[in-house]
Amino acid sequence: MTTTIASQQEIDANLVLLNEKLPGGDYWHGIIKRGNTLRITDSAGSHGVSLVLYNADNPIERLNVADTAKIQFNAFLKQGMVMYSDMGRILCSITSDTSGCHDLICGCSNAASNTAKYGDGDFNNSRNNFLKALGKRGLSRKDLMPNINLFSRVHVLPDGNLQYDRSCEQAGNYIDLRAEMNVLAIVSNCPHVLHPSTEYKPQPIQLTIWKSPAPTADDVCRTANPEVVRGFINTDALFAQD
């Protein structure tokens, strides 16, 4: 379903390539070409959005959540950070982020976690959503890896337990993901596995792909530290003969 972009006035409408509303519980999959940006907007106070990423040209290369956290010394993503593949290259850069609440720790919901929380019923979950999308792309269960949870913050307590922070449910927040290679993105709009509500009520989100500006020489995502510089050298080498 195509909608207006009235809530995203900072994007020139002439640059927009796709603009869709994703209802709660649904999933989306699509390719973001290198240099374009996917904006994911929390339209109504999200209960969490799960995301996995692949090299669209060679999907054996995919998001590595552990390296994304380890290389950047942070399990909570924010503007200026990047998302690493399992080959040490950069899938996406976070060029803008008004939320600052993105979780690399907890994984995604599944049928068992939904039943435990909501009881019996036909409640979509992110694991099944991912598998459905993968099947439509010629991929399978073996290609599914740990995901990123957007618009979600989890605190690690002194005793090691995890506590979900509902203060991140802020309608209007968004994150911009600039594709640094041709990226296959799968988005599942199902509640975070630790979201405390026992009512299944995921909120709609907006997905916008747009022709974003080319990075400048001092682009913070590309220059933040020596590790990310090496990551971009490896990534740009894939396109050196384009």
Image (cartoon, grey):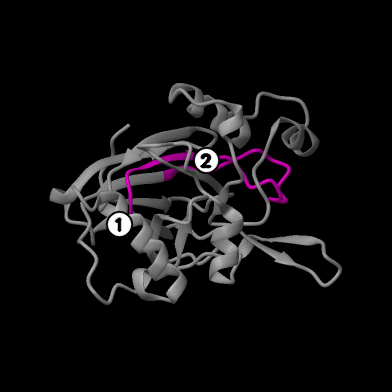
Q: In the rendered view of the protein, which quadrant contains the N terminus?
A: top left
Residue at 38% x, 60% y is: 93
Give x and y (percent) for residue 195: 68, 50
Q: Nearer the viewer, residue 183 or 61?
A: 61
Where is mark 2, residue-wise?
A: 189
Say if the magenta span includes residue 164. no
**Which SS type dominates the magenta stretch?**
loop
Give x and y (percent) for residue 110: 69, 35
Dividing the picture into quarters, in which one does residue 32 lie? top left
Say if the magenta span includes residue 187. yes
User: Is residue 73 shown left or right of residue 173?
Assistant: right
Give x and y (percent) for residue 47: 59, 49
Mark 1 → mark 2, Cα distance in angstroms: 31 Å
Q: What amino acid is at disc 2?
A: Asn
User: Is residue 144 shown left or right of residue 119?
Assistant: left
Dividing the picture into quarters, in which one does residue 111 lie? top right
- Magenta stretch, residue numbers: 180-205
Give x and y (percent) for residue 120: 76, 26
Q: Are marks 1 and 2 in contact (CB under 8 Å)?
A: no
* Kind of element beneath mark 1: helix
Q: Residues within 10 Å of mark 1 (few under 14, many from 20)?
A: some
Residue at 36% x, 35% y is: 30
Residue at 41% x, 34% y is: 29
* Kind of element beneath mark 2: loop
Where is mark 1, residue-wise?
A: 236
